[in-house]
Image: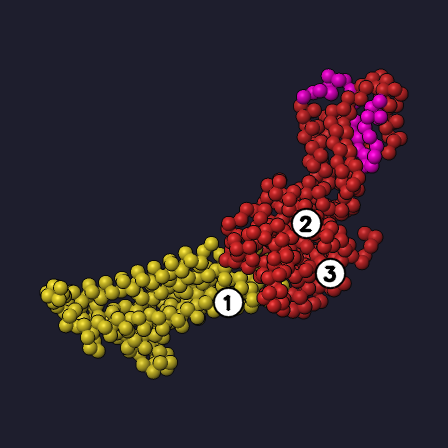
Chain colours: A yellow, B red
Amino acid sequence: MANLVNKFLPNVVANWEGDNGFVTAIWQTLYMTFVSALFAGVIGIILGILLVVTADDGITPHKKFYYCLDKLVNLFRSIPFIILLAVIGPFTKLIVGQTIGPTGALVPLVIGTAPFFARQVQLALVEVDPGVVEAAEAIGLSPMKIIFRVYLREGLPELIRSGTLTIISLIGLTAMAGAVGGGGLGNMAISVGYQRFENDVTIVSMLFILVLVFIIQGLGDYAVRKLEH
Amino acid sequence: MAEQNGIIQLKNIDVTFANEGKTIEAVKDVSINVNKGDVFGVIGYSGAGKSTLVRVINLLQKPTAGTVIVNNQNMLELSQKDLRQARRNIGMIFQHFNLMNSLTVYGNVDFPLRDSGLSKSERKEKIDKLLNIVGLSDRAKNYPSQLSGGQKQRVAIARALANDPEILISDEATSALDPKTTTEILDLLGRLNDELGITIVIITHEMDAIKQICNRVSVMENGRLIEEGSLLDIFGNPKEQLTKDFVNTSTHIGSVLDEIRDSGIVDKLSGRLIELNYIGDSTNEPIVVELYKRFQVEANILFSNIERLQSTTVGIMLFALTGDDDKVEQAIQYLDSLKVNVKEIDLKKEGK
């Protein structure tokens, strides 16, 4: 077994440990994915809720606020991620003190993902039956309680679906961020595997990313199945 | 509207929507007064503005103009917080039930109780009692998706009752249900009115629903309230064309007239067609016998419908009268002198 691995994946073995090795790269990818998912998730949910409740048919309509937020979300969604990485460099430095490495990638990842997720949250929450929202208003619930007890509760399966999708696309972005100095499996595949013609490294990097995607998708599907009645 | 001290008083309500530059007047200058203990029906076709009107009661819909007084509170002057408190006194049920799919039957009834300040065990006791009232004690652990339409509406009723409201608004609550389930739900509402003294406002497009439990009725058309009165007034003596249509649909006389017209039966009988309406205890047989005895006029009963509304008999009959022309004329005059409404029907003119 060890012989086979040595024979077919010599560079993977050579690059397994150490600061620039696979183990580090996997941790970096996980770190970038989940830390930015946490921040983008919170920001996205807040923005998504604001979009839903301030819309014309929302529970606290506010035309101007909705208009501005809606345009802002669209603006940030329109910037290609690879350009965003470069453009917000100074801002990144201001916030986390560095522009390279996994931590330096966090800021652009959050800014690149939050508007996307905000839109997903909005789509998930407008699916909540307006009749149920009306019933909650008739019962005498405050807007805050309607958000927590109706929107987030009834929209939960759809939110988890969107969250899964967002994390998977976020994994894709970490690979891109990795290629320009963020580290992680993307960096491994490009700066080791591709540029040094060590194809086995590229392929194994890809396989690790695929496994990560499958695990996330599986967990998401399981949670949705548990929640839906 | 003699009394102006009702539990719900809507005065000169206008509701106008602005939609892409056009203004739509959904409700125009409507005033209603619902007394405590009433089962007040609002009937009209869809688009008549009745849903909009009842939403004004708990201010789910803000009126463009007018006054809303519920339980001696001017609803339009309340703060948001006080308005939410006032809404707890007004239960509401809907055509599509509007239950939380993510909560069980128990959870749905508990939903309005979470801010009630009751302890968990007090809430459980109350929910058990409510589920017992609506007959769903054995379904507490089910989710709405596992229930039939009628059962879902029962859960919605239990939820609406959770905060012990004095008023229950039913927005087309039986329109999505089959006739048998409709009757059961209406029976339940009637029982709540009887036993708990809840004032109920029902909106519907079905006269049968109104007949079954309402004591007062108002008829809406194009945003206006065109006729209002006690159930017996409206049913026994409708004035507006729309009201007559609703009553005719309910007594089936409309379809009977169509059938008579199509079959040409009156031509064969060479008689005159008379419609007779009466409220109270006039019976039909003596009339038929009297007509023959007095005027030698034969009364051929083509249709008869007798109903008990709020313990009063309301009847409608359709005769073809045959005999000498002047005798028939006398017979009609005789009928006019009785305590019944007589109307001669000219089939060529009378549309449905």
Q: Amino acid at mark 3?
A: Val
Whether residue B272 is in magenta: the answer is yes
Q: Which residue is nearer to you in this view: A137 or B223?
A: A137
Q: Which residue is mark 1?
A: A50
Residue B319 appears at what percent x and percent y?
Answer: 78, 25
The span shown in magenta is: B263-289
- Measured from the top left, where is residue A148 in percent x and y? 52, 66
Could you confirm whether marks 3 and 1 are on the same chain? no
User: Which residue is depicted at the point 41% across and 67% down?
Assistant: A115
* Circles 2 and 1 in contact, beta carbons < 8 Å: no
Residue A36, by quadrant, is bottom left
Residue B70 disc label: 3
Q: Label 1 is found on which chain of the structure? A: A
The answer, for residue B344, to whether it is visible in the render is no
The span from disc 3 to disc 2 (Cα, nearest Å) is 20 Å
Report crowding for label 2: few under 14, some 14 to 19, many 20 or more residues within 10 A (C-alpha).
Answer: many
Position of the C terminus of chain B, as image quadrant, is top right
Please state which of residues B161 and A46 is positioned toward the viewer in this rendering: B161
Depth check, mark 2 against mark 1: the one in front is: 2
For the residues tagged 2 and 1, is the chain the same? Answer: no
Dot 3 or dot 2: first in sequence order is 3
| Residue visible at 27% across and 64% down in the picture | A209
Mark 2 = which residue?
A: B189
**Mark 3 touching mark 2, by CB under 8 A?**
no
